[in-house]
Amino acid sequence: MSNWLDQLPEAVAAYLGGRKPDEVECIVADLAGVARGKAMPASKFATQTRFYLPNSIFLQTITGDWADIPGQAFTEPDMILTPDFTTATAAPWTADLTLQVIHDISDQAGNPVSIAPRNVLKRIVGLYNARGWKPIVAPEMEFFLVARNVNPAEPVEAPIGRSGRKAAARQAYSMSAVDEYGPVIDDIYDFAEAQGLEIDGILQEGGAGQVELNLRHGDPVRLADEIFFFKRLIREAALRHDCYATFMAKPIEDEPGSAMHIHHSVVETVTGRNIFSESDGGESPAFMHFIAGLQTHMPSVVALLAPYVNSYRRYVPDFAAPINLEWGRDNRTTGLRVPVAEPEARRVENRLAGMDCNPYLGIAASLACGYLGLVEGAQPKPEYKGDAYSGDESIPRNVSEALDLFGASPAMREVLGEEFCAVYESVKTLEYKEFLQVISPWEREHLLLNV
């Protein structure tokens, strides 16, 4: 790879400015979306065409335990990692001149590793491509800036802003509220610019210290890569200013949770025409089929969109999170919203995914539901008009229910890949068992001396 520097994107070349990098981080996203990999001197990186990591990185729970691949011995065979230079970007918070490169993952026979989240998303995009379609997504990222929390037993609190007061809640879209932590936002912009990542907008959300960052629409794999990078850079920006950035679905009691809303459209590969719109600008049958797919199949993938016990605390009526899969035009109380848009930009927004989900898996799951709807040609329920929080709570309410539905959907397991589904279910089941061993403060407060 002696000419590897010539393969770098323009943004990286501009960042280097003719200098040679000191270090390269060879990274992949694990099942939780955590960056795993190796860091090495750039001089060593230049002499190698591939790298190796054990497949056990995809068997690790969020607590650090390891699950099994059902039916297989735990032998940790090596996977082959090859750099995808289109993803190369800076790590501008480091002391040395460091680059990050996401790697493609294959087995020793050269086949894509089916349990790698990025490969799962590529698989779903491939299903669309095979039918002459190109899926387009536009994610929204919500997160909280919070005070440093070094004791997990203590509640999470809002950060202190430049006024000397804690960040205030119920200040959605307030410019003065977002200015309270302007230095963090400035670093987020600076890091994103250095990395060649484009931000469509930043705004104050409804929670105390809660921020929303919007990304421009585009290719699902590229956007998932960007969210993967953004999570890391946002955390680094917060640490520079003595606070944390958290992507937990519900980090603070009595505050809204953080979502990863996903806007979807589908275009014809050859013509670029949005298949959700007719030539006269009206809604197409394909648009209704896509919505029907989301309504029909999304319960079976809530385990991917809401992967942790904390995720389900977000689904509370009147807290800006859906409690069902009703759909409506310009209605933010529904789980599936059709935004106001011109015919060429007609799309549907999935409001169910939490920001704690792995972006590759969250986008893959959502697109998989829409794909099945397009193939099946089903019709959605009638549009919900009015406050959907008054409707039925028709989504799984906890990890156990979600995993039961995930395991009982042959159609979804076929499109996502049976081996991936088996591994995901194994990891999440083990995480849930570990959680059930923990006695909470609520139990000690209300049960210890009263029952």
Image (cartoon, rainbow, N blue to C red):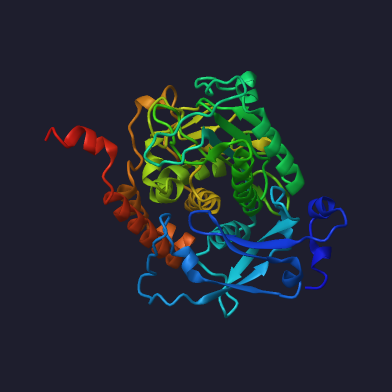
Q: Where is residue 53 in the image (x, y as percent from the top left)?
A: 56, 71
Camera-side residue of 319 and 244: 244
Q: Which residue is drawn at 43% across and 57% down?
A: 412
Q: Which residue is drawn at 44% across and 24% down?
A: 385
Q: Position of residue 282 (x, y in %)?
A: 62, 33
Q: How many marks?
A: 0
User: Quick one: which residue is furthest to the left in this view?
Assistant: 451
Camera-side residue of 57 and 292: 57
Camera-side residue of 385 and 422: 422
Give above or below for 213 relative to 26. Answer: above
Q: Position of residue 138 (x, y in %)?
A: 62, 41
Q: Where is residue 337 in the image (x, y as percent from the top left)?
A: 52, 33
> Seen in the image, is 207 located left or right of residue 265?
left
What quarter of the picture does the N terminus occupy?
bottom right
Identify the image quadrant of residue 102. Answer: bottom right
Q: Residue at x 47, y 68 (%)?
A: 56
Identify the image quadrant of residue 36. Answer: bottom right
> Seen in the image, is 355 located left or right of residue 234?
left
